[in-house]
Amino acid sequence: MPYVNIKITKEGVTTQQKKDLIEGATQLLVDILGKDPATTVVVIEEVDTDNWGIGGESITMRRSHVK
């Protein structure tokens, strides 16, 4: 039973986009590894940009510098 955990920043991802991610990740495991889609689990975790850091600062802070 494959388990896929997709972590993305919480920034307005639509229900349709999540559906597409789940379907796409499942199909990738079917196509590449021959896995059974009926037993493939895909979890999408949305992380607030204050809780996701790169290079010692949060995504929120990094994006505030870009303006």
Image: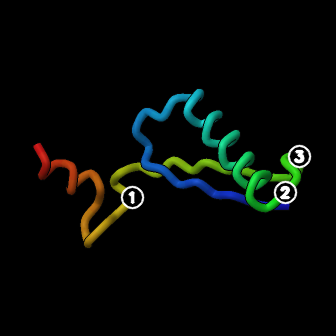
Q: Which mark is residue 35?
A: 2
Question: Which residue sits at x=51%, y=47%?
Answer: 46
Mark 3 sits on what residue? 38
Which badge, 2 or 1, is on the more N-terminal residue?
2
Q: Quadrant of the N terminus?
A: bottom right
**Image coords of residue 63 (percent x, y):** 21, 49
> Label 1's element?
helix
Tell me if residue 25 comes above or below residue 55 in the rendering: above
Of badges 2 and 1, nearer the viewer stands: 2
Q: Quadrant of the C terminus?
A: top left
Q: Residue furthest bottom?
A: 56
Neighbourhood count class around disc 3 (C-alpha, 10 Å): few under 14, some 14–19, many 20 upward: few
**Image coords of residue 28 (percent x, y):** 70, 51
Mark 1 sits on what residue? 51
Q: CA distance from mark 2 to mark 3?
A: 9 Å
Q: CA distance from mark 2 to mark 1?
A: 33 Å
**Image coords of residue 21 (percent x, y):** 61, 41
**Image coords of residue 20 (percent x, y):** 62, 35
Which badge, 1 or 3, is on the more N-terminal residue?
3
Q: Are the residues flagged by discs 1 and 3 in contact, CB closer than 8 Å?
A: no
Residue 58 relative to residue 51: left or right: left
Q: Residue furthest front?
A: 31
> Label 3's element?
helix
Q: CA distance from mark 1 to mark 3?
A: 33 Å
Q: Which amino acid is tagged 1?
A: Asn
Tell me if residue 10 comes above or below residue 20 in the rendering: below
Q: Which mark is residue 19?
A: none
Question: Which residue sits at x=40%, y=39%?
Answer: 11
Neighbourhood count class around disc 1 (C-alpha, 10 Å): few under 14, some 14–19, many 20 upward: few
Tell me if residue 21 comes above or below residue 49 in the rendering: above
Question: Which residue sits at x=48%, y=34%?
Answer: 13
